[in-house]
Image (tube, rainbow, N blue to C red):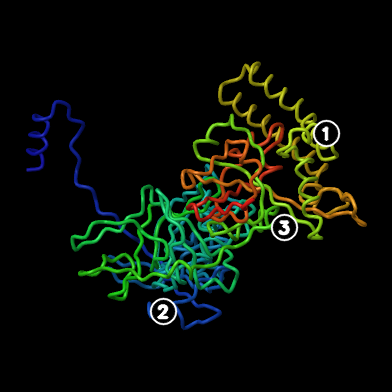
Amino acid sequence: MRRLFCFWMGVMAIASAACYSPVEPPTISGDFVISLSFQQNPDLGKSADKPRPVARLGEIAQIDIQARKLAPDGTASNNDAYDGYICLYSSRGLLEGTGKAVKLSNGRAQVPLRIRLAFGKVTLWVGEVKDDPTNPGPNGVPICPDNANPQDKTRPSVGQSGSSAPIFYQLLSVADLQETDASSGDSPLYKRQAVLGSGKMVVTAVTNNGFYISDMNAVATGLKYASAFIFTFSAPNLAFEDGEAPRLLEVGELIHCIQGGVDEFSGHTQLTFPSFTPIWKTSTPECGKPPPQGKNEIQRIPVDQLPPPIEIASDILWTRSKMEPYESAIVEVKNTVAIPFSQSQDGWQEFRQWPVLMVEADRPEDRAACENYIRTELMLHNDPAKNDLAKSTYRTGLKACFDARKPAEDACTKTRSTCTKEATACEADLTACKQKVVDTWYTCFFDERFRTTEPKGLFPRLEAFTPQGAQAPAVCRYGIMLVISNATVPELDVTTQEHLTRRFTRIRGVLQQTKASSYYGLVNDQYPDELSNNGYVILVRNSDDIVVEKK
């Protein structure tokens, strides 16, 4: 019958490759049994009603692995003769120190492992691995994927495997997602899935492509690492199943849980491809479930009871590590003045981006003198005559760095025009050359600005000067903040001369990290990172966020 079937298929096909015999079913020689024990709270995590707390810094678990062999009839018994290597994996969270395979001797291994940021229902599993001749590990020990590194592309060959019983954890809080010790500010769960469901999450701002949340339960911590942006691609709508028309999510509404992928857009942490479940008034919410039937109302907090804005002062502004904890939070700057900026750069007028200068003085009576002095030093004065003064120490040092960078830039231009290598090699040379330009600039920059007798350097604390009539030198600090008002404040035309004389009692909005290149051309002949706020902007939500001082 099989030959007749093959013959008939060969007649019907224009080109027939072959007729294959039935494939033999794969045989599984064995598997692994995994058991876990925890040093702390050993009884938690065995059921969903008694979950383990999320370990932001990690917790130690002892993993016991036993190899087994399977008989043809499916029965299993310990395989004490097994001698090989396995890799460890986790369905959620981070397993630290997993880049090296674990050796099983006499069919067993006991491994202490740090589990970090596991959440929800978690399963650990192991897979047999053999050394890859094309990418051998050190001393013959196979290489495993580093579960804590999202950039790790290791893909070992896997034989028999085994998994643990589920471990139940609480869902993540916003701070679990946001808090990081990485200099980049990236979330520790970057490029992974996350489910936020702990804390009291409230909507603080809504945009045309997402919404911002803050955890009300984190108020006691100063709302550090307590806010996040949820990127929904289009306006975040709530669709109901009982025939009601969808509507926009609103500020003050409470969110029960949010799940999505963790991404970094220009350094700004966000959840993408999200699904979210509000807290309904009529029923106990269940994450991911549709709204209840009938009239659907969402629990909400009055706007005047939302988390208070966090004031960004110059001591916070000049340190990225101090700015990062407030990413996506509602922040404000007070008593600032407008400063000139280049309107020739693309996007300034379209997106209504404009910088403001904040100045602080140790003695309140010196503030006006400090502001005048700093604006003159930085060539940001609205009085053109004061921008023509002799070069200051600040300007002289800045010019020295530009002069030092010029030869490196010229070398890149030559590399681009004279390279005779293959295109990829030329591109690599040009990339290296551009990096040298950056290195040259920052080496000079830190020498000139930061490695001085004053710890904070010449930028946040300019050299002391004595105001007219004062008995002692003034101590001044400053910072520059970029404001993005978009079309939310149409009556405020930032391109007029009048704008440069404005003083703002308060500017409030969402703190968002963005590309440093957004600042290029902010002020003629100055790099963005010297003058900006380390790549953060205030995204104004509405007209009430900006209060102009009355003259």
Nearer to us of marks 1 and 3 is 1
Which x, y percent locates residue 112? 56, 71
Can residue 91 be seen here? The reply is: no
Using a 10 Å C-alpha cutoff, classify the residue at mark 3 as few (fewer than 14 neighbours), some (14 to 19) or many (20 or more). Answer: some
C-alpha distance separating marks 1 and 3: 28 Å
Q: Which residue is drawn at 62% across and 55% down?
A: 505
SS for tag 3? helix
The type of residue carrying mark 2 is: Lys
- The residue that disc 3 covers is 315
The type of residue carrying mark 1 is: Leu
- Decide if residue 292 is on the left or right side of residue 473: left
Rendered image: mark on residue 46: 2
Rendered image: mark on residue 340: none
The type of residue carrying mark 3 is: Asp
Nearer to us of marks 2 and 3 is 3
Nearer to us of marks 2 and 1 is 1
Q: Please say if the residues under marks 2 and 1 sit with CB atoms less than 8 Å apart.
A: no
Rendered image: mark on residue 389: 1
- Decide if residue 76 is on the left or right side of residue 89: left
Residue 185 versus residue 61: which sits nearer the camera?
A: 185
Which x, y percent locates residue 187? 54, 56
Earlier in the chain: of badge 2 and badge 1, it is 2
SS for tag 2? loop
